[in-house]
Image (tube, coloured by chain):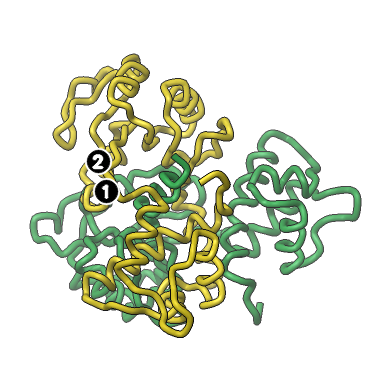
Chain colours: A yellow, B green
């Protein structure tokens, strides 16, 4: 695809995919835009508009074929394949992530772990030997890894992210509570539990 | 406030707050809507529109006073106080969360941990004794806790969420990879690292 859909639409596609996968697993064959939208928390009109950016997937008045739309979204998101992922940071969060079964269930495989703490380098977590950050560039390039999960403290996150970019990483899942400044062709998703909590205290 | 702003706007307020807090810590006194928007990834017009839902915070042509706007957003989000939080699930993720310093830095204090695994009940994580889920209702009510973090496996998450709602919880941070079905007055933020990864593979 030569042009990209708006980021906010791209971020909704995984939610549509999640809902469609659940429906397909239950054997449901057809779903209306209203019902699929309801499951994701968007209007039927928004759902149709989002999907229309990528092609024609539904038939007027008939709704969407669940399995077909699921597979099309998998293709659009490029998750109809396995991705290998590097984990940076072997602390408490890194331990939880490397053992998180949902990544592998969705074909994201953490297959290399780095840390800069001499006490952690050489130890094994989730079946993987923790490597020194000194080996970052060579290892990632040798393994053709384009995705990294950043689970390091905030005060070193920007430096580590810079190193990752230099090593060829093009997509980052950032758990550090800072906004990273990176080149435009590097795409970042930010996991920010404090911001998520602050968005619900509003309603209390 | 009798009416609520749209959820999507509420979810941007913590990002504005994060940026303003950083600017205030650096001693910056004034910021334009363009520059603040840039730091959060929204247009100046969107920023002004978002904030206008909550009051008049800027002066035409003069921008926003950083400390004043920070404090107003803290008040709007109700994070100008300490919140006590219950953690449900003492597994690898629970361990990481109970030791996550960013929660306390932003005045969210996990002060009780529950699990249903007899091998975990009575053990201590992050300085807290893991309690039996049987004690959930009594403990949360006695401690007037309204916020819980759900770090349990997907197959039990809905049941645990139902128990939490019965115990008076009104806000949930859900780490389980399922969509919870809950009463309208219970507000949920969802941490979904797989969806976050799937949103960046689109660009690779």
Can residue B86 be seen from the camera position used here? no
Q: Position of residue B129 (x, y in %)?
A: 22, 55
Chain identifier of the residue bearing label 2 in the image: A
Residue at the image position 56 percent from the left and 61 percent from the top: B11
Pick the front one: A78 or B163: A78
Q: Check the image and report above or below for A91 versus B173.
A: above
Q: How many marks?
A: 2
Residue at the image position 75 percent from the left and 46 percent from the top: B66
Chain identifier of the residue bearing label 1 in the image: A
Q: Which residue is the site of mark 2?
A: A109
Q: Residues within 10 Å of mark 2 (few under 14, many from 20)?
A: some
Q: Residues within 10 Å of mark 1 (few under 14, many from 20)?
A: some
Mark 1 or mark 2: whose residue is earlier in sequence: 1
Looking at this rendering, what residue extends furthest in the left direction? B119
Q: Check the image and report above or below for B65 versus B49.
A: above
Can you tell which mark lies on residue A191? none
Q: Check the image and report above or below for B156 versus A166.
A: below
Can residue B47 be seen from the camera position used here? yes
Q: Quadrant of the C terminus of chain B?
A: top left
Q: Is A77 on the left or on the right of A26, as rendered? A: right
Q: Is B100 on the left or on the right of A29, as rendered? A: right
Q: Is B160 on the left or on the right of A55, as rendered? A: left
Q: Which residue is the site of mark 1?
A: A103
């Amino acid at each position: 695809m030569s042009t990209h859909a708006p980021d906010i639409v791209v971020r909704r596609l995984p939610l549509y995919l999640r809902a469609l996968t659940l429906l397909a697993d239950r054997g449901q064959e057809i779903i209306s835009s209203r019902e699929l939208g309801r499951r994701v928390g968007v209007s039927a009109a928004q759902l149709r508009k989002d999907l229309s950016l990528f092609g024609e997937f539904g038939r007027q008045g008939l709704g969407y074929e669940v399995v077909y739309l699921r597979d099309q979204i998998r293709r659009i998101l490029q998750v109809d394949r396995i991705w290998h992922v590097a984990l940076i940071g072997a602390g408490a969060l890194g331990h939880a992530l490397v053992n998180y079964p949902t990544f592998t269930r969705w074909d994201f495989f953490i297959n290399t772990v780095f840390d800069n703490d001499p006490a952690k380098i050489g130890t094994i977590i989730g079946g993987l030997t923790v490597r020194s950050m000194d080996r970052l560039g060579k290892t990632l390039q040798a393994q053709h890894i384009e995705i990294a999960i950043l689970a390091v403290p905030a005060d070193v996150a920007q430096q580590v992210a810079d190193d990752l970019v230099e090593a060829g990483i093009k997509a980052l899942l950032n758990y550090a509570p800072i906004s990273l400044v990176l080149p435009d062709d590097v795409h970042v998703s930010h996991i920010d539990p404090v911001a998520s909590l602050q968005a619900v205290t509003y309603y209390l």
